[in-house]
Image (cartoon, rainbow, N blue to C red):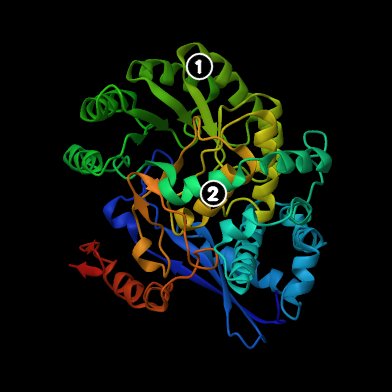
Amino acid sequence: MVRGRITGLAASDIRFPTSLGHHGSDAMHPDPDYSAAYVVIETDARDGLKGYGLTFTLGKGTEVVVCAVNALSIHVVNKDLEEIVNDFRGFYRQLTSDGQLRWIGPEKGAVHLATAAVLNAIWDLWAKQEGKPLWKLLVDMDPKQLLSCIDFRYITDALTEEEAHEILQNGLLGKKEREEQMLKHGYPAYTTSCAWLGYPDQQLKQLCTEALKDGWTRFKVKVGADLPDDIRRCRLIREMIGPDKTLMLDANQRWEVKEAIEWVTKLAEFKPLWIEEPTSPDDILGHAAISKALAPLGIGVATGEQCHNRVIFKQLLQAKALSYLQIDSCRLGSVNENLSVLLMAKKFQIPVCPHAGGVGLCELVQHLIIFDYISVSGSLENRMCEYVDHLHEHFKYPAIIKKASYVPPQDAGYSTEMKEESARKYLFPQGEVWQKILYLSHNKCFALRGDAIVK
């Protein structure tokens, strides 16, 4: 039973200087500092539980999202949690339809990222009060209650509420067995940690060797900056992992449409399963053209991590513009909007392979994809969830990987709570690490090794 009136909402700018080690580097983002707008919600309930939410960012700009969170707080503070949960669709629409804030969205950009952070915190609190991990809270919901959390506005031409209800009703068959399978075997994952664009060859080889020893069979490589170098690096990775392992490519929006087709055609010899984000994430017809051109080569198109909202996903599905759909737990409007996209993907029979990595994305999205398998898709065919082995040590309930699969979380909540020490240490700019970096940055003669900055 949910309880309590929300008495406070605090937002923090948390940044990890990952750019110093080229972690996360790709063709469009050469120096990301993995960061998060981190939200903490408190209530007057006697249990003392708090809700923790976040939105992933790359450093600069996090302060903008924090400002947006604070602007949205007027719709949150002094609300009864029970009132929110009992009309979650209405609350979602209230957040996304603020008559003034909507102008700098709507349902996209910094305001929508902030919306996700706020809602992620509310879902975390709800799950904690129910004593369940988020995925289990969703799995145990009655279909009608689940649908009451979704705003179907703008997508009924692709998926009606009645169709969504039928999908969930059909998902009840075999649900118990699928949940048992998840608990026993986990959800299959792939790794992106081995082949960031800024890593030298020796590091690629070392990381691939270690990943193979740990049982990884699916690998993603960043491409798009230089074709000869992409060919060389893909050949190196393919030789390392062998012909039977799965290889994916990710261009992070680098190319024009024709350029994408020509470039990927020249990489086809390495047998990639997909090319991810080949062009602008907003170019629906461009993705459709690329998909059509690459289909004869057996290469699919994957996209979604920069997809603004359910409306863009709707059009990508309608236009047959993608073969693999990549939801993001922070780009979309939290669980609520992701539920609508999972249901649309089921109707259009497109496998969901979520985007993860960053700060907390693995912790978050594991809940959504486990729920998807148990209650919506009912299939693991052509499905896997991204995993990046960075920054998990800063979370109180980190994602756990065994045999290259996500182990379903057992702790109550959405796995979003950071360790207090980490949140203090990496608070920007007052945290201990950033004070040192800002002091030393004038000469750029430093490196980051773990938590230690070395001149």
How many numbered marks have been drawn onto this rendered protein structure?
Answer: 2
Query: Mark 1 packing: few (<14 Cα in 10 Å), some, or many (20+)?
Result: many
Image location (x, y in percent) of residue 320? 65, 24
Image location (x, y in percent) of residue 149? 75, 56
Rendered view: 432 above or below 394: below
Q: Identify which residue is drawn at 36% across, 42% down.
A: 192
Image location (x, y in percent) of residue 347? 70, 32
Q: Which amino acid, by three-letter code, is at mark 1?
A: Leu
Q: Which amino acid, by three-letter code, is at mark 2?
A: Glu
Name the secondary structure under disc 1.
Answer: helix
Q: Is residue 306 visible?
A: no
Name the secondary structure under disc 2.
Answer: helix
Quadrant that contains the C terminus: bottom left
Residue assigned mark 2:
179
Residue assigned mark 1:
294
Quadrant that contains the N terminus: bottom right
Q: Is residue 247 left or right of residue 50?
A: left
